[in-house]
Amino acid sequence: MRTLWPRLRAALGRILGLTQRAAMDRRLEEELAFHVDMEARRLIALGLAPEEARRRAAIALGGRQVHIEAARDAYRSRVLDDLGRDIRHGARALRRAPAFSLAVIGSLAVGIGAMSAAFTVTERVILRPLPYGAGGKLVMLWSQNRRTRQRDVISYPDFLDWTGASRSVARAAAFNVWLPALTEPGAPSEGLAGATVGTDFFRVLGVAPALGRDFRPDENQFAPGPVVILAHSLWKRRFHADPGIIGRAITLSSGSFTVVGVMPEEFRHPELLLHKQVEIWRPYAFDATATARQNHFLRGVARLAPGVSTAQVQHEMDAIAARLRLEYPADDGGKDVAVVAIEDQIVGPTRPVLWAALGAAVCLLLIVCGNVATLVLARHAGRAPELAVRRALGAGRARVARMLFVESALLGVVGGAVGIGLAWVATGLLRAAAPRDLPRVDEIVVDGWVVVVTVMVTLAAAILFGLVPALRASRRPPGDLLPRATGRLTTHHRLRSAVIVAELALSLALVATAGLLGRTLLRLGAVRLGFRTDHLLTMQVSLPGRRYGADSTRTRLYAQLTHGLEQLPGVESAGITSSLPLSGLNDISFMIPVTPNAVRDRARWRDAGFRFVSPGYRGTIGLRLVAGRDFEPGDSAGSAGVVLLSARAALAFFPGENPVGRTLVVDPDSVQGVRVAGVVDDARDGGPMTDPIPTFYVPLAQGSWGNAAVVVRTTDAPMGHERDVRSVLASLDPSIVATDLQPLSTLESALTARQRFYGLLFAAFAAVAVLLSALGIYGVVAYVVTQQRREIGLRIALGADPWRVLGPLLGRVATLTALGIACGLLGAAAVTRVLSGLLYGVRADDPATFGIAVSVLALVALAAGVPPALRAARTPPAAALRVE
Amino acid sequence: MVRDSGERDDLLQGTLDLLVLKTLQLEPMHGWGISERLRQWSQDVITVNQGSLYPALYRLERQGFVSSEWKTTESHRRARYYALTATGRRHLTSALKTWERVSRAVNLVMAVGRT
């Protein structure tokens, strides 16, 4: 390094000539000033008045700028002329070798493009600060199941106790899911993701509305204050960015709200709902039941006091939670507090994957540089006679090195430019293909910062693959560069060997990663959800509160709706549920006292999910009845309360007993028991990667809300029935808002979208890496045998066994392959461990996957290395002798 | 490698370079000193414009015929002094020989018919 740096600096300085230029200008200025001064003195000595002498001396000097230009030309001409000549010469030389140029530019573009795209994603998603105000750290507060470590929502009293007793929390706000529909007249209604928030919510995040005002503390009333704040995107999309929106009333499914503010463009809610950005906020209002301690439905966000770390506040929360457990032993429910830094909340599990992707891209680029360097070295070696003639004619070492470097730099510039283009295209594709719940995915754009980094990377790459070979080619004395007849199989192959080993190692790591993700996808596809997702159309409906305030009106409407839908041609059945499976909205965790006796003994309460469902729901979604009977139209508001239990719930509530016909208390506020009508299969409502939660189902006629999801089983493609379904709803009541019409299979694929996306990403990386490895091995073997065609041909002509001649070379390739695979196994072990959170049903060190990856690479090495060697072995001896 | 491409076509420029090298034969000198010395030696016939002198000096330096460094004059001013390098000295010697041969030839041609 110590010897390389001055050399690099000198070479670059000579090429740029810029520092030199400024110094030369200063020097000339001083010399001219001195000259004028001396001339004036001479004239004074001749008897002129000092003033007149200075005037004449200045006139004699003439146009100073002209002199500067002339002098500049004099010292600069060589540098610039030579550089211009080198560039022209280089461009000509590259045009004469199109295969070489295209191979280099192509692989550079792929390497630089991949690296820029990966950098763009990493910078935008991980490195760029979140759009929240400065100050103490921001954390999210969750409850966490002590046994399963699963995070869950929290109750309002818990939130108040935790944040109130904590000294490290400076400010905190709770928020909840809100799914209103926007029903402005004259425009199609649209289902929005929204949040009901504490009035301090935006002050906790440290962001003020860009337009209008924040919520006022007095707007947090038990009667909802009808005000909302809009996201910039919603304001732009639905209200044409009209600044007059402030103070205007807008119509939502739940009534009319006055817009008081619009958030800044870059603001993002800390959480996605239904895979969508939250675009509307209103202050929350709680009634008494919502504030019960066992009623978990909120998320908490807190701003810590300056200097307090997440670990410190976690420690404090643990102590507070322990105290609360003593105070309310019945409400414990086996839950701890989880304090999660907001960066981890938003970017969390994505971070290691993106770092891995960036690391892979950087390795890819390094390998591209290595490959290109071997190509360039081979080309220089092929040009040995030309270089020898140049040096013999008096070209200096630096001159030759510069000529060669300029050629490489040209390749680098073109490759870099194409690479930025590729990165631009790739990030566009990423934005489109990435799962919608990938954090900050809409922020992924190539910007000036990325271009700057890419230019720097390109320069570094050009130095790596251009300068080193150029210096090496120019180092040998002129005579040495003259062609020599013989060569050894092992001269100057250290770099090439290292490149091959690195390529194979990276390829193996990537192939193994892609393989594990592929197997994960296969396993996920094979998971039994407990219900069917095919041929199911789903939609969300919200009933206007004024007309459907009473349970009976809702029940009647839901019955009419399912009846109407079932009359449609191509519809087999229809059902209604309070929350759709796979929608991510099953976070209502009720703890229920299982038996009337247990109501007072809260230690015997059990965690459970629940749903209100219509009689047709179970059959429509394909949930199997295991025991007992399904709901019937007779299970009405007037009849005895019944429930269906999931198999796990049955096991949890009635271990070792037949639950059918037993009674159960599901409402903590009442000792009224409900009868278990039947048991249904467990359903993985959270998707294939989650465990089924114990769930009980309540007939829609015995409980419902103004929001529900409709499921329709069709005989053919579900979306073909969209219009019919909408018209049935409109004929019943046009004021009912229907949103999010989509097949249930769409929701299912959204849940595995990350695995598919990362699988594709790593498969693409793996394919490129394998291709590069193949090229690299092929290139090296082809180069070596071409260099030694004469020797190989002669030896075979003299009767040597071709395999004996080529054996050492092929053996060396085999050794390098083995070495590369060994290094790759180590690398793959590290990478796949990082990704283990994404894997399902397959271990991060799955031997089968690794075995396949190793075989693939061994085959690739074989396929790339043997053909050129065989070709050399078949060289007719006569051709071999004519080589030079 | 041809180092002085484009510089031979201008006879006057080549001559100026030669004159400048000649003034430096005895001792290193700054720009003004060179022009003054040329003026004195040519008995006021040759006055070199700065616009030609400094480019010539830079060119010669770049070609390796002269080297330069900052020094202090007798009057304690900072000035850039130019000195002949070994290459410059060899170049000057061979250029002087060429010059003598050419100028003698030119003189011979010019002398024809004068007697």
Image: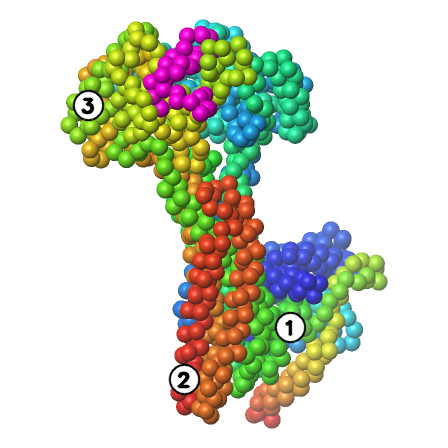
For residue A657, what is the image quadrant?
A: top left
Which residue does the numbered mark 3 point to in the structure image?
A: A566
Whether residue A624 is visible here, answered yes or no, is yes
| Subunit of label 3 | A
Q: Is residue A367 above or below residue A627?
A: below
Amino acid type, residue under disc 1 in the picture: Gln
Instruction: Please tell me which of labels 3 and 2 falls first in the chain.
Output: 3
- Which residue in the structure is indicated by mark 2? A875
Q: What's the residue at 38%, 29% (across, down)?
A: A682
Q: Is residue A361 left or right of residue A732?
A: right
Pointer 3 and pointer 2: residues touching (CB < 8 Å)? Answer: no
Nearer the observer, disc 2 or disc 1?
2
User: Label 3 to label 2, Cα distance in Å?
Assistant: 77 Å
Extreme residue toward the front, this view = A657
Residue A579 in sight in this render: no
Instruction: For the N terminus of chain A, give its image quadrant.
Output: bottom right
Tell me which corner region of the image, top left, top right, bottom left or bottom right, holds residue B22. bottom right
- Report the span colored magenta: A652-679
Q: Give A367 or A50, whichever is nearer the viewer.
A: A367
Q: Disc 1 designates what residue?
A: B63
Image location of residue B29, percent across then percent down:
76, 68
Residue A869, compared with residue A537, is above or below; it is below
Determine the CA span between mark 3 and mark 1. Answer: 96 Å
